[in-house]
Image (cartoon, coloured by chain):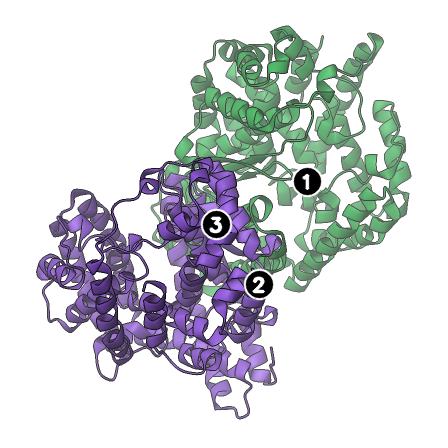
Chain colours: A green, B purple
Amino acid sequence: MEIKSSTVKEILERYKTIWALNHASGVLGWDREVYMPEEGIGGRSLAAAEIAKLIQKLMLDESFVKLIDKAKEERDLTDDERGIIRMLERDLKFYRRVPPEIVAEFAKTTSEAFVAWRTAKEKADFKIFAPYLERIVELTRVIADKLGYDEHPYDALLDLYEEGLTSRDVDSIFSVLEPGIRRLLGRLEARGWPRSHPLEEEPYDRQSMEAAIREVLGLIGYPQRRFRLDVSPHPFTTGLASPFDVRITVRYPPRDFREPLFSAIHEFGHALYELQIDESYAFTPIGTGVSLGVHESQSRFWENIVGRSRGFTAHIAPILRRHLPFLSKYSDDDLYYYFNIVRPSLIRTEADEVTYNLHILLRYRLERLMVAGEVKVADLPALWNDEMEKLLGIRPKNDAEGVLQDIHWSHGSIGYFPTYTLGNVIAAQIRHAFGTLEEAVAAGRFAEIKEWLREKIHRWGAVYPPKELVRRATGETYNPTYLLNYLENKYK
Amino acid sequence: MEIKSSTVKEILERYKTIWALNHASGVLGWDREVYMPEEGIGGRSLAAAEIAKLIQKLMLDESFVKLIDKAKEERDLTDDERGIIRMLERDLKFYRRVPPEIVAEFAKTTSEAFVAWRTAKEKADFKIFAPYLERIVELTRVIADKLGYDEHPYDALLDLYEEGLTSRDVDSIFSVLEPGIRRLLGRLEARGWPRSHPLEEEPYDRQSMEAAIREVLGLIGYPQRRFRLDVSPHPFTTGLASPFDVRITVRYPPRDFREPLFSAIHEFGHALYELQIDESYAFTPIGTGVSLGVHESQSRFWENIVGRSRGFTAHIAPILRRHLPFLSKYSDDDLYYYFNIVRPSLIRTEADEVTYNLHILLRYRLERLMVAGEVKVADLPALWNDEMEKLLGIRPKNDAEGVLQDIHWSHGSIGYFPTYTLGNVIAAQIRHAFGTLEEAVAAGRFAEIKEWLREKIHRWGAVYPPKELVRRATGETYNPTYLLNYLENKYK
């Protein structure tokens, strides 16, 4: 890290306290999902809320803000210094523009909304969740207005998750992806959709599966003394703004070993990003992945482009057969086929890499309408089902497998979904920029692939805004044609 | 909780932030010992130090201190309110009197001293540790002077760990215990010390042992949704100033199942205290065990007085035999004997309940001399060995099994050891006050015992200072004769 400005030095010194609170929040969140006894939840929520308030207070501390304002005016800042100021200003912008009462009400609403959503999903009844979603949309709109935007209020929300991303960017991505994917799906449909596969119903031993996962991750290579693999209801990665302690979780549903296998590889992609950030950025605002989209590019790159490739299948097939004896009758080709079954399905999280982005397109369209006030919340279920039928030719039988399937809206995360597709787009750009990726994978040259990612993306942490990082790494900004080419080539 | 004063209400409202930081520190500490990847230590130490500084800053915030000063002057405070103010003032006293530079230097010194102690112990060479201990003693003496005391600087240190405890109290306890225990040991020695027992070298299966422990704890009864049992290098209990999330750890050395069994019961005693504190005290300064001594009375009560009793052995023997098949040839009486072998030994943590307090007496004497400057650090090893020979008739062969055996001094914890003996003393007072304890244990009336402890001790959290709590629970203050009677009766 290159720090020359004494103002920035002072900022970093003071930032340590904020870093410590972020670190604590991260560990508290990880613990809540993984090991906390059930009844600890009340105290944990109180602690999380208090710490969030304290972070806001420390960020808005007048003397700290003054330092940031002062540093901003300085000339000849290094890239690292500019990155630090940029990241702090992003947080400051939110804290300054969105009044704490709104933040508090949003937190209260979403925590109630989450409970309502869970019940609504269980009962497949959108009406239970609707009033909460209405309130969330109202508050989200208020937040978007407070934050400000040039063209569409949705842009203010996109920027929260992906710095600088606009509806124009997303529209331009989907304007290529939608027709291309639908064309590809048309060709696949002509051959007939594959039937259900026996392995989808095959139970597996959980301990053996975990052993297999550890071996698969070991094949790619990770620093054991900086990494953990645990179990939680939903897989996730915890980075703590330092490359010295990064943790992933998976879950083990009773059947279909693909889920834990590919979620582990997916989360490993996230983890590797955090693990390979320049060590000198640790405990600073730039010691973290720069955005959700770039993060997702890393997880999708490893999960899909590497993980579901023919070459990778050949590497892991012997490991899987050793730990899961029921696989002995399946060849490498059988497994490769099984890992890459494409068919329209209702649930996003179970979707293959071809149809996946249409699930996102559906959500993107609905979110924009919601935020613009152009659709009533009450009309969402029907709209969802109509869009699903248009995009994928299938129609949910109920709200649980339709509009209620995702947790995101109950959390108030509107503007988040597009980062999933952006991740897929960037992952394919990386594949192209790397050059002969499939050959490197087939040859097991994982160290080389990791080094490329480290040098081009990971090490930079949050120094550069996402668009600039992608341009530096791949030579161009978001370009969805590589994703389309990759998919067409793989599924031809 | 009875809160009438609006000032105290405001204090509690503001205290929530401090509670949250304490909660975070607790979870960070737990995670560090139990699950944190090794290389996370640098960041974790930074976070812990920053959070400690922040707690101090929030405590010393002028407006917060004013509230406390104001509340102190109010009349008609309830017991709960007085407890809250008393606990806050204890912290304030330390923060106000001990300059932050001293605290910082102490933290730096002890963190280096810990590393030196570990090496010194490995090499059984006190000289490696001596310069660090010298500096720790100096700083400790400064802290004692800053804190202030009436008779002996050691009293200022005792009070840090056990509110109100003085050298006079400790002297008075040992003036009864030392001759009594030596008399008892004399009688036991006359019969000859028992030889080594085959179970001491017997390996056990770790999974089976854990299953046995869970069953033994289940027999006593604990709230599963508020409790965790994990593994760490040294057993400990984590309370988070709320009864909703309490965690213990044990370790599983390769041989001798007694260690994990009785450490689990010991830690369970600590946990039960925290678990049974009045729920309305959660997230306040009184929602925690009041002192180390009272805490230790709970762990020793369950470990020794209940756990090593003949009646309890009869309850757990079938569980142990089921999980540890090598016990099938041992009768209940064999196990009872094995759980209660008394013989002089060099290592405190392995000592039986008779000799244990002489190990503490040795440390108490040395610590008082150190703090008073009446012994040179360089002379400690010889002094230790001489004292050991006087008290227990055995002499360490090297420093590792003598003066270097405990971690405490390297942590800067001088004045801590006496709380162990105080815990034993209070535990025996509780046994006496309960009345027919051995009958209740034999009859498996654990709910009744727990309810007694809850009503007399646990529920009160830190409302009353330790001496007052003990007086309320047992009808008198510290009285070591019950411990002596218990030991004489058990080992006659």
Callouts 2 and 1 close, C-beta under 8 Å: no
The amino acid type found where label 1 is placed reads Tyr
Q: CA distance from mark 2 to mark 1?
A: 56 Å
Provide residue B476's location: percent of width, then percent of height. 41, 83
Which of the two marks, 2 or 3, is nearer to us in this view?
2
Q: Chain of mark 1?
A: A
* Disc 2 from disc 3: Cα separation: 45 Å
SS assignment at label 1: loop
Task: Tell which residue pokes out farthest to the bottom in this image.
Answer: B75
Callouts 1 and 3 close, C-beta under 8 Å = no
Say which residue label 2 marks: B445
- Sooner in the amino-acid sequence: mark 1 or mark 3: 3
**Identity, as a three-letter code, of the amino acid under mark 3:** His
- Which image quadrant: the C terminus of chain B? bottom left
Query: In the structure shown, which secondary structural element does the residue marked by tag 2 occupy?
Result: loop
* Front one among A376 and A197: A197
| Residue drawn where x is 61% and y is 85% of the image | B4
- Which residue is label 1 attached to? A416
Secondary structure found at label 3: helix
Q: Chain of mark 3?
A: A
Dot 2 amino acid type: Arg
Q: Is residue A67 left or right of residue A383?
A: left
Q: Can you give x and y, in whole percent of width and height, for residue B188 in the image? A: 24, 60
Q: Position of residue A325 (x, y in %)?
A: 60, 15
- Badge 3 crowding class, 10 Å Cα cut-off, few under 14, some 14 to 19, many 20 or more, is many
Q: Which residue is mark 3?
A: A23
Dots 2 and 3: beta carbons under 8 Å?
no
| Badge 1 density bin: few <14, some 14–19, many ≥20, Cα 10 Å | many
Identified at 58% across, 49% down, the residue is A32
Question: Number of callouts in the render?
Answer: 3
Relative to the observer, which residue lies in front, A206 or A25? A206
Q: Quadrant location of the N terminus of chain B? A: bottom right
